[in-house]
Amino acid sequence: MDSEVISVRVAKEAKEALEKEGVDVSYEFKNYIKRRLALLRLRKTVKELEPIIRSMKPSKRGFAVRSVREDRDAGH
C-alpha cells in the first residue's frame, strides 16, 4: 500500500501531555484518518442504498411473527 506524509502542527503542550499519558500521537492520528475514511465510505453506501430501501414495500402484517415461529419450529 502506498503512503503519503502529512504534517500536522500541534501545540507542544498538547503533544507532551498526551505522550506523558502514554498516548502514541502518531498512531492516534493515523487511526483517526482510517476511522474517518470508513465513516465517509459508509455514508456514501447508505446514500446509494437509500432509494432502494425507500422503494421497498413493507412486509405484510404478522410476517415477522410467522418467520420467527417457522425458524423456531424448524430448529434454527
Image (cartoon, grey):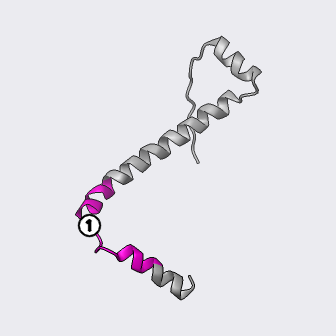
Q: Position of residue 1 (x, y in %)?
A: 59, 48
Q: Which residues are magenta?
A: 48-68
Relative placement, left or right, of 24 versus 52 is: right
Quarter of the image where the C terminus is located: bottom right
Residue at 31% across / 55% down in the picture? 48
Report helix, strand or loop for mark 1.
Answer: loop
Q: Position of residue 46 (x, y in %)?
A: 36, 53
- Occupied quadrant, residue 66: bottom left
Magenta stretch encompasses residue 10: no
Q: Residues within 10 Å of mark 1 (few under 14, many from 20)?
A: few
Residue at 43% across / 48% down in the picture? 41
Relative placement, left or right, of 14 versus 53 is: right
Please, is residue 59 above or below residue 25 in the view?
below
Residue at 76% across / 27% down in the picture? 22
Magenta stretch encompasses residue 49: yes
Give the main secondary structure of the magenta stretch: helix
Give, as a three-letter code, the residue at label 1: Met
Residue at 65% across / 12% down in the picture? 12
Relative placement, left or right, of 34 versus 52 is: right
Q: Position of residue 20 (x, y in %)?
A: 76, 20
Instruction: Quickly name the residue at label 1.
Output: 56
Please, is residue 12 above or below residue 34 in the view?
above
Please, is residue 52 above or below residue 15 in the view?
below
